[in-house]
Image (spheres, coloured by chain):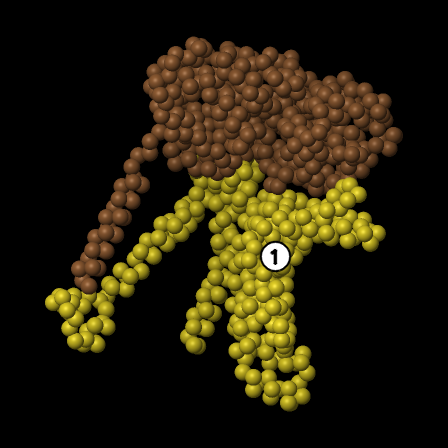
């Protein structure tokens, strides 16, 4: 009996030891590329990269979005034999803790707020030898912190557009407005015809209110212009300036009244932003217009797969807007390995821009992609983007830690709060964020 | 330790000399609890001390909180984060506005939760425990009441969010509003109306935790000696008098333990508020505020200050709970 138990003891020790050895062995690289034939597109530079080099990546995209990213990076991966070790998560805290712990991934695709947040730890684009000639000045300005360009904008979307149904417009005899006064008249005409002009939905969990802040910023762009918005972002114009107050009041007039928006104030704050988009295209439509960013197209086609772009749903630019509000996801580098340098060089190159537009992963700020979009709605948005001279970021994205206060302020305003007090609370948060 | 070593040295058990075998060295108990102590220190004690330390620093822990003072406003030096945590939500311009904003601030809401959720769960749990005791299908009744405890807070939040849904079109997908509009009334936006929404959320909390209180109180009631109840009935007491003047005083210690446990649960409550309203429309509680400061505004100093305030508020109840628990154990 003693010998038998000794046998089992030795066997279990051996098993545990072998499991430990297997677990602690270094993992093999995920893609073991064979020696590649020389790539046909020799405009992808793989200087200093040896086949099998790894790049660890973190981004928020999964499912179909991740497939699109992989399709875009495929020419680069094939040409240079780089192995990408990806991680997809929407959790901001995950990225924060990795950076704070000193073990950030090599490349991160995240929001523009993170450029400022991690400014000291990022590797600047010049240090990576990236030529940013393909990017318009306003992109470079947005990504430049303390004089250094800290990231490459990769996936852009514009916000200053209004979605509507061309069929419903022609039936009712409406035309697309081109000035703000025409928009006002159109709204009043819709009300007189017994229709509801706007569909507004702010509800979005703990980010409730963000659609309101987007709308207000577009109104500010119409009434004041892009330099004013830039001054707010820089902190030189306080948030409780009369210009901002005017925009809040114009927005409030529409958002709080049942005549102008579905359900009035209660409807605006309780309706989810995706539901608000759907309401314009239901049968019968509950409202005529919804102001929303470009992603609305995806929402419409998912909910109503039979609708055709151009006939059943289309968009026009916010009338009279001087400049354009939008945002982008930014590619940022925490390391300066040769493989990372090659990746960013590819993204900033002509080939990179064309690939991005071809795959259609939203708009690409890379000018080389302006003409290669295959999707019609993306092409139209790209034209708007290329034609604009004053592109501004979302104020909430541009000031770290400020967004949440802005969202709550707008929600309170629609729910019946005191405007002066709300604006000074937001102004205090703005002052802290821009210090 | 030395004694036990001597006994086993020969490779065979010596005849047990009870006194020496049972006598443990001075350090032996410490070795037994050492692994648990290490884990507790690393995962609970150290983070707590670190949190308190961080609450005196600024938002990215690079300098003291005193540097975040704004000129022209009150400043508490290194305790600046605490000043923000305690006063930011309250509008102190007049006593009336201070009173009103206090009751929609996270502290006011937490007090409302504490009072109404604890009262609700304990009273309803007690009533159900007593009533279930008297019926034949008692196991079935108790399982049904207990079932909501089996789902997560987040699941309950999502379910009730749909129940309270306020739709703008003719079709109401929220059960309660559907009933109201079917009876001819006007739909109510439960979750966005300032004072009403907190009570709607408290209803969800009560729904979830009543089962817990009922179970504990039910076992306490069953341990009341039958003779006392019978004697009181023979003496002519009504059921209500039996309940209030005999049963409740006998199980009073258990009721106190249940109350303190529920208070601790309520103070920590986060999921229901976060899932259903995100803390908007005046439904904030301390835990959602802490989350928002830490992870949405990236302000470590303020988030940890709120966390420390929460710990300080919970400590008296934990103390009472443990004291009662030790007393109960001593009686057995």
**Toward the viewer: A372 or A231?**
A372
Q: Residue A129, how many percent across, how many down?
A: 41, 14
**Toward the viewer: A232 or B143?**
B143
Please name the residue shown 23% across and 69% down the image: B24
Tell me if I can see residue A413 in this picture. Answer: no
Query: Does B300 sit left or right of B31 as displayed?
Result: right
Q: Within the image, what quadrant is residue A100 found in?
A: top left
Q: Residue B169, how many percent across, how many down?
A: 78, 41
Q: Which chain is in brown here? A: A
Query: Does B5 sit left or right of A361 as displayed?
Result: left
Quarter of the figure that contains the N terminus of chain A: bottom left
User: Helix, strand, or loop for circle 1?
Assistant: helix
Q: Which chain is in yellow here? A: B
Please name the residue shown 64% across and 44% down the image: B280
- Establish if B189 lies above or below A224: below
The residue indicated by pointer 1 is B205
Q: Residue A282, how many percent across, how many down?
A: 75, 34
Tell me if I can see residue B156 in this picture. Answer: yes
Please name the residue shown 56% across and 71% down the image: B217
Q: Residue A147, how many percent across, how many down?
A: 47, 18
Please name the residue shown 43% across and 73% down the image: B329
- Most extreme residue toward the bottom, as rendered? B235
């Amino acid at each position: 009996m003693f010998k038998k138990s000794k046998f089992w003891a030795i066997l279990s020790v051996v098993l545990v030891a072998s499991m430990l050895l297997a677990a602690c062995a270094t993992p093999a690289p995920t893609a073991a590329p064979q020696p590649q034939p020389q790539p046909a597109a020799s405009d992808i530079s793989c200087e200093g990269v040896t086949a099998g080099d790894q790049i660890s990546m973190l981004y928020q995209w999964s499912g179909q979005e991740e497939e699109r990213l992989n399709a875009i990076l495929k020419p680069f991966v094939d040409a240079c034999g780089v192995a990408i070790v990806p991680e997809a998560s929407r959790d901001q805290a995950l990225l924060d803790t990795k950076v704070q712990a000193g073990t950030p991934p090599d490349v991160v695709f995240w929001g523009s707020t993170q450029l400022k947040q991690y400014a000291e730890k990022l590797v600047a684009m010049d240090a990576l030898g990236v030529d940013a000639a393909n990017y318009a000045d306003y992109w470079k300005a947005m990504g430049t912190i303390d004089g250094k360009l800290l990231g490459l904008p990769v996936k852009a979307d514009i916000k200053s557009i209004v979605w509507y149904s061309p069929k419903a417009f022609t039936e009712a005899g409406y035309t697309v407005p081109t000035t703000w006064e025409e928009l006002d008249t159109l709204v009043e005409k819709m009300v007189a015809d017994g229709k509801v002009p706007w569909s507004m939905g702010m509800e979005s969990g703990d980010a409730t209110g963000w659609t309101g802040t987007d709308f207000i910023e577009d109104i500010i762009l119409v009434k004041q212009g892009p330099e004013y918005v830039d001054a707010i972002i820089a902190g030189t114009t306080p948030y409780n300036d009369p210009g901002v107050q005017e925009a809040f009041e114009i927005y409030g007039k529409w958002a709080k009244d049942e005549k102008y928006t579905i359900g009035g104030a209660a409807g605006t704050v309780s309706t989810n932003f995706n539901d608000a988009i759907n309401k314009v295209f239901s049968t019968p439509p509950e409202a005529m217009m919804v102001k929303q960013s470009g992603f609305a197209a995806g929402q419409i086609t998912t909910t109503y797969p039979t609708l055709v772009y151009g006939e059943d749903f289309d968009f026009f630019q916010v009338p009279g807007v001087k400049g354009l509000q939008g945002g982008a996801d930014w590619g940022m580098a925490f390391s300066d390995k040769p493989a990372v340098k090659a990746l960013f060089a590819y993204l900033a190159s002509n080939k990179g821009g064309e690939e991005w537009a071809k795959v259609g992963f939203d708009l690409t700020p890379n000018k080389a992609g302006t003409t290669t979009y295959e999707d019609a709605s993306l092409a139209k948005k790209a034209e708007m983007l290329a034609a604009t001279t004053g592109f501004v970021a979302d104020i909430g994205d541009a000031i770290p830690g400020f967004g949440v206060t802005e969202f709550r302020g707008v929600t309170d305003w629609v729910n019946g709060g005191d405007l002066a007090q709300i604006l000074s609370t937001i102004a205090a948060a703005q002052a802290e964020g821009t210090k | 330790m030395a004694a036990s070593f001597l006994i086993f040295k020969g490779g065979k058990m010596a005849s047990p000399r009870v006194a020496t075998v049972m006598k443990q060295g001075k350090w032996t108990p410490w070795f037994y609890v050492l692994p648990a102590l290490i884990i507790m220190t690393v995962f609970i004690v150290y983070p707590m001390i670190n949190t308190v330390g961080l609450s005196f620093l600024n938002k990215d822990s690079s300098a003291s909180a005193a540097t975040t003072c704004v000129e022209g406003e009150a400043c508490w030096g290194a305790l600046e984060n605490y000043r923000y945590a305690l006063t930011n939500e309250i509008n102190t311009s007049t006593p009336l506005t201070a009173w009103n904003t206090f009751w929609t601030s996270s502290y006011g809401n937490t007090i409302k939760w504490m009072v109404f959720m604890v009262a609700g769960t304990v009273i309803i749990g007690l009533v159900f425990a007593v009533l279930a005791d008297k019926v034949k299908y008692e196991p079935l009744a108790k399982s049904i009441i207990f079932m909501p405890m089996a789902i997560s807070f987040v699941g309950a939040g999502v379910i009730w969010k749909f129940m309270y849904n306020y739709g703008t079109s003719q079709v109401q997908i929220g059960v309660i509003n559907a009933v109201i509009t079917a009876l001819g009334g006007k739909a109510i936006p439960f979750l966005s109306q300032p004072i009403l929404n907190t009570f709607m959320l408290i209803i969800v909390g009560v729904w979830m935790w009543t089962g817990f209180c009922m179970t504990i109180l039910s076992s306490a009631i069953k341990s009341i000696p039958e003779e006392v109840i019978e004697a009181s009935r023979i003496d002519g007491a009504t059921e209500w008098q039996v309940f209030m003047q005999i049963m409740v005083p006998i199980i009073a210690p258990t009721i106190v333990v249940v109350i303190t446990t529920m208070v601790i649960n309520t103070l920590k409550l986060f999921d229901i508020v976060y899932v259903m309203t995100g803390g908007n429309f005046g439904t904030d509680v301390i835990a959602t505020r802490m989350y928002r400061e830490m992870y949405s505004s990236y302000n470590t100093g303020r988030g940890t200050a709120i966390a420390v305030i929460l710990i300080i508020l919970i400590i008296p109840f934990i103390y009472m709970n443990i004291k009662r628990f030790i007393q109960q154990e001593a009686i057995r």
